[in-house]
Structure formats: structure tokens, C-alpha cells
Image: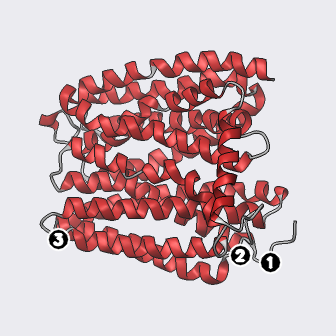
Amino acid sequence: MHQPTHNPLRWVPTVYFAMGLPFVVLNMVSVLMFKRMDISDAQIAFWTSLIMLPWTLKPLWSPFLGMFKTKKFFVVLTQIVTAVAFGLVALSLKMPHFFSVAVALLFLIAFSGATHDVATDGVYMTELSKSDQARYIGWQGAFYNMAKIFAAGGLVYLAGYLIGRVGNVHAWMAVMGICGAIMLLLGAYHVRALPSGGAAAGRVSTFADCLQSLWTVLRAFFTKKNIAWYIGFIILYRFAEGFVMKIVPLFLKSPVEQQGLGLSEEQIGLYYGTFGAVAFVLGSVLSGYYVAARGLKNALLPLCCTFNLPFVAYLLLAVYQPSSGWLIAPAIIVEYFGYGFGFVGLTLFMMQQVASGEFQMAHYAFASGIMNLGVMLPGMLSGVVSDWLGYKYFFVFVLAATIPAFLITWLVRKLIANHQ
């Protein structure tokens, strides 16, 4: 492995910030934007879940990127496409049928963002040695999560601040415009700062060769020992979270008389962007040490409990509907700490049990795609279930939806023991 000609600190933080920003805006910020514009919970949950589909399907077109240009080319191109699309989303909000137009543009952003992820990871793994990959993984994770804090915290807070001054539509136009400007600046910066990423390993010269390569990788994945149980685990571990992800922001925003908490965008941005972000990072760091000390097999069930049981905090919020931030913030802290702590278990499982072998990078991409599908499908249904049950009984339903995760985790622990 050659020495990188570009200092990784010049591009690793910025390119992974660019990876995180569109994902968080589509996954959460757009939910609050559409809620403000009187779109129903069912429509918001369905469409903002469906537009995440490219992050599930990205392994299917990732081999084709190696046939054209460099990885850097696709990173910069997708950042510019995303920037333009965010600008168009901003303009669409003044249209009579803004929702359908905005959703179409957000889907374009999702496709561009998923392609950006593939190319970015390719640059990272191609340009950096194994030791450098480990050395800069902390910077990668920190700035991806910085994008979460910036979007779910800063941008949502800004939207709340602007709504009272320039109106609802212009406030969200400004937020989408800022996202576009940031992505455009990052694209311009990476023209000079980002290394090329070289050619893909095992580069193919024809479309038929590329299809054959994809088939070989797919066949190797689906013939792994215990793969059916492993796929079940990947899907069910986050099954309950898939229902919660879209509904929690809607629940926090809905008026008290509609079983919500009636929070403003400024309050939601503050709780998520400060307390939630700190709890998430702390949980992730502590979980790494916990798994290292106990081993994945022994840690998996406690991690599953920590990941799923904190959803009871939202049930308590729905039952008592507190107005004090001193009661709401701790619930978000508990849930985000559990999310950060428990998510590590799934990540390590996919790396160590599912992706091990000849096609490690591709098989990890397949596993992460399946994981996103497992979140997307319940997310699409979550609005219908929430409208039917109301928020209070919806969170009772969510707790029942955690049961399959505990059962499959208990089973997979035995399979890991036999595999070792």
C-alpha cells in the first residue's frame, strides 16, 4: 500500500460529513418539514421510508462504478447532484403540489447519496493502509455523527427560529437551500482535496463481466453457513426501531390534544442535537469497550436489551405527556444512549459473522443493505399503525414488536458459539 499523497485529515472528516448530511435530512429533518406543512403522519412515514430504498439497493450497482472513471469522480459528482437537488427541493416548496415534487427530488438525493457512500468507502479503503484505516476510523465516525448533530439539531432549531420570522415555507426553503450550499461547497473542496481512489480491485472491462462478478459475490453471500438465520437477525434486531424512527419526531411535534407533546422545532433540535447526540456518542464508545471485554457472543443479548428496551421511555411520554423539558430530555437521552450502545452489536455481527471471507467489503454492503430494508419496511407501515392506534397504544405495539429481536438474538448466540 502506497503512502497517501493527500493528508487523510484533509478529506476524511469532510467526505464523511457529506455522507451523513443527506441521510439524516431525508430520514428525520424532512419528516418534521412535511409535518409542518400539514401532510398526514401515514403519508409522511410511508414516503420518507420508501425514499430510503437506494441505501438498501446500493450493492446492486456498486460493481458498475468500477467500470467508469475514478471513485473520486463519483464522490464529487454525487455531491454536486445532491446540492442541486436540495436547491430544487427548496424551490418546490412554493408549488401547489409540492409534496409529490419534493418526494421525487428527495428520492434523487437518496440515489445520489447511496452512490456517494459506495464511492466514498471505496476511496477510504483503497487510499489508506490497514493501519491508517484503523487510525482514521474515529474521525470517520465522528464527522458522520457531526452531520447528524448539525442536521437533526442545528438545522431543525434554525427552522423553528425562522418560522416565527419569515413563515413556514420560507423557513424550510432556507434550510434546504443551506443543505444544497453546503454540499456544493464540499464538492468544490473535494475536487482538490480528495485523492482519486484508484481503480477498483479486479476491474472488469465489459458489462457482462460486471454481471458475472456480481453474481459470484451474491452466490457466495447466500451460500454462507447459517445465512438465513443471520439475515433474520439483521432484519429483526432493528424491527421495532423501524416503526419508531419516523413516528417519534411526529409524536414530539403533534399537539397535546392529539396525544403528542406539542414541542417546537427549536425544542426538538435542542433535545436531539445536544442531549441525544452526546448520549449516542457515549453509548457507542462504552459499547466498544464492553464488547471487547465480554466478546460478541456473551455481549449480544445485553446489547439487544439495551437497544430495544429504552423504547418504553416513549410509552411513558405518551401516557403522561409531560411539558417539562427536564422530563422529556432524559427520555431522549435514555433512548439515544441505548441506540448507540446496542447498535454496535449489530455492526460487529455483520462484520465478524456475515462479512468474513473472500468478499468482505461487498458482503458487508449486502448485509447493511438488508439491514436498511429491515428498517424501511416497518417504517413505511408505521404511520398507518400510528394513525389507527394513536400514539399511546402505538408505543405499546412497538414494545411487542421487540419480542422477535430477543428470540432471534437468543438463537443466534448459539450459532455464534458453534461457529467459533
Q: Nearer the viewer, residue 170 or 85?
A: 85
**Is 413 positioned to the left or the right of 250 in the image?**
right
Residue type at numbered disc 2: Pro
Earlier residue among tags 2 and 3:
3
| Mark 2 and mark 1 residues within 8 Å of each other at the beta carbon | yes
Instruction: Give the amino acid type for the residue marked by disc 1 in the picture.
Output: Thr
Q: Residues within 10 Å of mark 3 (few under 14, many from 20)?
A: few
Residue under label 2, please give it: 195
The structure residue drawn at horizontal position 60% and vertical position 44%, both measured from the top left corner, is: 366
Q: Which residue is mark 3?
A: 94
Q: In the rendering, at what x and y percent does residue 405 appear?
A: 51, 22
Q: Is residue 4 left or right of residue 59?
A: right
- Measure the alpha-carbon separation of dots 2 and 1: 8 Å
Other-residue count near label 1 (Cα within 10 Å), few / some / many at <14 / 14–19 / ≥20: few
- Which coloring applies here? secondary structure
Quadrant where the N terminus is found in the figure: bottom right
Res. 232 visible in picture:
yes
Disc on res. 75:
none
* Residue type indicated by callout 3: Lys
The residue at the point 30 percent across, 30 percent down is: 317
The quarter holding residue 410 reads: top right
Circle number at residue 5:
1
Q: CA distance from mark 3 to mark 1?
A: 46 Å
The foreground one among 38 and 201 is 201
